[in-house]
Amino acid sequence: MGVKAKKKAITKKLKKAASDFSASRDEAREFLPLEGGPAQKLPKTEVRENKATVLYIGRIPHGFYENEMEGFFKQFGTVKRLRIARNKKTGKSKHFGFIEFESPEVAKVVADTMHNYLLLEHLLQVQLISPEHVHPRLWKGVNRWYKPLDWVKIERKRQDNERTLDDHKKLVEGILKRDKRRRKRIEAAGIDYECPEIVGSIQVAPKKIRFDADEDLSSRTDRLNCNYATG
């Protein structure tokens, strides 16, 4: 065998080894490599079954609440449950919510159909939520109709409560602290202004009455009543 034939055989063996190595390294691929050689297999992708039945709905317009939402979306299929996020103090809508259908196919159709749907000048944002991303407490209290607290009534009751002497003292101390800070701000601003004194801020100390050792209870009571009447 001549030198040229040996070189040709070695080159052929190297190309074959290189192609075998690349094929064994990427057995899962199926495409024609740019450098030539046998076809390679592509990775197999498993088609996941759609099991999502919960939808997130954003940009919900004012007036489109639970009853309206259920009446609108039940045209697609059976609505299992829904909820709209609401403010705990006022009970007003936060303009987003969640809805669950019985069938994953219906939920997929709703997500494809209603995303960016113009409703009452709002573009609805509808997205599927996978089961592993659904919060376990998402549907807690969904069957209870939320009734907001009457904060006006609560504040009125708090203001109408009878204050004890300690409560009145704390109230006066708070007023005096705020007045002191206000005076400092006025003085720091270079304003020559004499703030009036707050009426009732100075509490008169109670009178100390000294009783004689041989004075009976009735005479002490008479003296106390006389002092309260004159004082």
Image (spheres, rainbow, N blue to C red):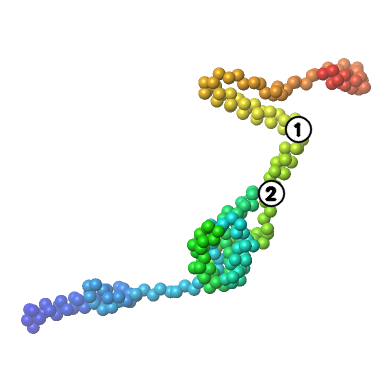
- Front-lying residue, 8 or 115: 115
Q: Residues within 10 Å of mark 2 (few under 14, many from 20)?
A: few
Residue found at x 15% / y 76%: 11
* Outermost residue, bottom side: 1
Give the quarter of the image for residue 162.
Answer: top right
- The image shows residue 212 at horizontal and vertical percentages of 87, 16
Q: Is disc 1 placed on a helix, strand or loop?
A: loop
Q: Which residue is mark 2?
A: 149
- Front-lying residue, 43 or 81: 81
User: In this view of the protein, can residue 52 be seen by the observer?
Assistant: no
* Residues under numbered marks 2 and 1 in contact, where contact means CB atoms less than 8 Å apart: no
Residue found at x 64% / y 26%: 176
- The image shows residue 107 at horizontal and vertical percentages of 54, 69
Left or right: where 125 falls relative to 89: left
Which labelled disc corresponds to residue 164? 1
Q: Is disc 2 placed on a helix, strand or loop?
A: loop
Q: Name the quarter where the C terminus is drawn.
A: top right
